[in-house]
Image (cartoon, rainbow, N blue to C red):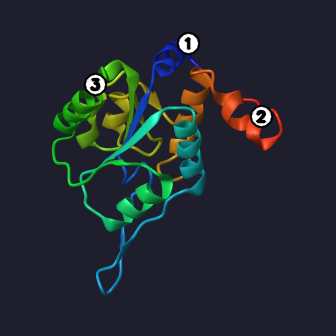
Amino acid sequence: MDKIFFEKLKEVTLLVLDVDGVLTDGKIIIDDLGNESKNFNVRDGHGLKLLMRSGVDVAFLTGRESEVVKHRADELGIDNVYQGVRDKAKMMGKLLATKGLSGECVAYVGDDIVDIPAFRMVGFSAAVADALEYVKLNADYVTVKEGGNGAVREICEMILSARGKWDDVTSRYGMKIER
């Protein structure tokens, strides 16, 4: 891991995630009755659980409103869920103020133009591999994995490693897992 990224990630106490295109592959399925479904990657979810066990808080910040997102957040034990957000920078400001945090201890992962203003407010910004090119150019880091396909897990493991928590959270599995 690049030393600059390592130093930035070492300070992270809050990970903020866009949902569609980051936690999912960006596809929304709506059936004839109007029921919506999305695909979430179970490994991303486990990465978030590992991160939360290490003391890092997680928030979802999305422009759409969806019951599916609420269900996924509940399943993972994530209380910080902000849906229907039109101005992500403004909401980030409120979130930071509410939690009494400076942007330097926050990481944000996004994939689209609406995420760029939030990138500028945090200590570490990441775009998923399949984000729009101009979004990637505005991020500190571009994941190897695509949104909905392990990008979030990749970021979680980077944060855990940088904070020196990887061995702690993986020790329960009875073996040393090299990172």
Q: Secondary structure at mark 2?
A: loop
Looking at the image, tell me whether mark 2 or mark 1 is earlier in sequence order: 1
How crowded pointer 2 is (Cα within 10 Å; few <14, some 14-19, many 20+) is rated as few
Q: Nearer the viewer, mark 2 or mark 1?
A: 2
Q: Is residue 124 visible?
A: no
- The residues tagged by marks 2 and 1 sit, at their Cα atoms, a distance apart of 21 Å
Q: Residue at x 16, y 42 (%)?
A: 87
For marks 3 and 1, give the one nearer the viewer. Answer: 3
Q: Quadrant of the C terminus?
A: top right
Confirm or deny contact between disc 2 and disc 3 (CB under 8 A): no
Task: Choose top left, top right, bottom left or bottom right for residue 1.
Answer: top right
Residue marked by disc 3: 100
User: 134 above or below 33?
Assistant: above
The residue beneath circle 2 is 177
Disc number lying in front (2 or 3) = 3
Residue 49 vs residue 66: left or right? right
Q: Look at label 3 and name its amino acid.
A: Gly
